[in-house]
Amino acid sequence: MHSNATPAPSVRDLLRQGLAIPAHPLALDAQRRLDTRHQRALTRYYLDAGAGGLAVGVHTTQFAIREAGLHEKVLTLAMETAQSWVPASRPLAMVAGLCGATRQAVAEARLAAGIGYNAGLLSLAAMAGHDEDALIAHCEAVAREIALIGFYLQPAVGGIELGVSFWTRFAAIENVVAIKVAPFHRYRTLDVVRGVALAGAEDRVTLYTGNDDHIVLDLVTPFTVMRDGEPVTVRFQGGLLGHWSVWTAGAVRLLAQCRRAAQDSAVSAELLALDSRVTDCNSAFFDVAHQFRGCIAGCHEVLRRQGLMAGTWCLDPDEGLSPGQAALIDRVCREHADLGDDAFVAANLERWLA
């Protein structure tokens, strides 16, 4: 019997389309226990806002969910909520955060694949101090379990410096489908671009911005590097961002705007001006004034104001808003309200919380 159903696109093909993928936060109650109702509402919000997938168990979800015994529960809840909320005909890039040394990362990849995740975002923070050969062997082991998204995490929150040579070798791994570039650093961002080009992997490995400090420019800039004496142009296709865990409907609009502009021969001054406005918002949400200490609580605060979270609680009782951060969030919400999605959330909140 022949089926007329179109086969679901691979996660590689999906990511190539250029998606807005929010990093999924963790909703807790005042006792710092999982708040299932708000956690489910967040998932529904992201999907209704037009997100092309979700990243769960990542930095924004708090890596401490592992020690708190919430890891599998949080991954499963997001997957089940997504599957019951959107039609099966709408494919999603469901990305699970993976961390730890090789044994742990491989086990997390197997767990995620078993739950139904189709890609893993691999943090190398636990591998600090290992040489490049060991890092590549680690990545290859994890890539045998799940389609892999590389992750250049900024050193301020635990990332390690990785050069062109590493990214060239990483991009050559067969089951690598994308790289989230998030060093918050122009030189290091170029290292990833150059590595992908030198590996000849630009048609196979899709770049996603995680540079919350430069979202718009990453999405509209053609990055041209030389390979064997010929210019190769690589572009970021989408974003996988903690910043996009808030004002997600606005983020989806912004990505569409950037992708349209990237097709044109010139980018408007108006769109370029958005870069610094988005960065201004991010400086408040991510608590740049205090070296990102309140970056998770800042996103929680925006979601709390909209009713999508009950509070800003994090698993670590010492983690919260920094002094003056709420006032900064007040300012950017006032000055950049057109980038937000308050009306969209207000119109749908009851349905998401049901």
Image: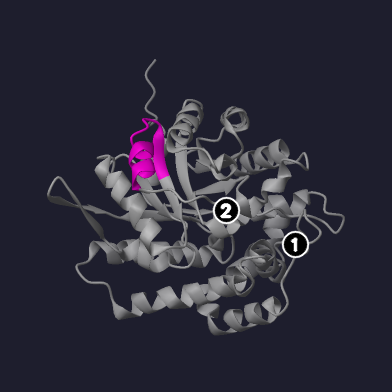
User: Residue placed at 45% from the left, 50% from the top?
Assistant: 180
Q: Residues within 10 Å of mark 1 (few under 14, many from 20)?
A: some
- 326 falls in the magenta region: no
Residue 319 - label: 1
Secondary-structure class at tag 1: loop
The image shows residue 24, relative to residue 212, as above or below, that is: above
Which sits in the foreground, 75 or 341?
Answer: 75
Report the residue that reaches farthest toward the left: 229
Give the numbered dot on residue 23: 2
Identity of the residue drawn at 78% across and 63% down: 310
* Badge 1 amino acid: Glu
Element under label 2? loop
Check the image and report above or below for 186 versus 118: below
Dot 2, how many residues are within 10 Å of its Cα: few (below 14), some (14-19), or many (20+)?
many
- Note whether residue 9 is visible: no
Residue 206 horizontal/vertical position (percent): 36, 46
**Amino acid on which disc 2 is placed:** Ala
**Looking at the picture, how far across and down is residue 175, in whole percent?**
40, 31
Circle number at residue 273: none
Judge whether 181 appears above or below 102 on screen: below
Instruction: Decide which of tag 2 and tag 1 comes sooner along the chain.
Output: 2
Q: Is residue 342 left or right of residue 71?
A: left
Q: Residue 286 in the image: state x and y as whole percent.
A: 60, 68
Which segment is the magenta one? 164-178
Check if mark 2's residue and mark 1's residue have beta carbons within 8 Å. no
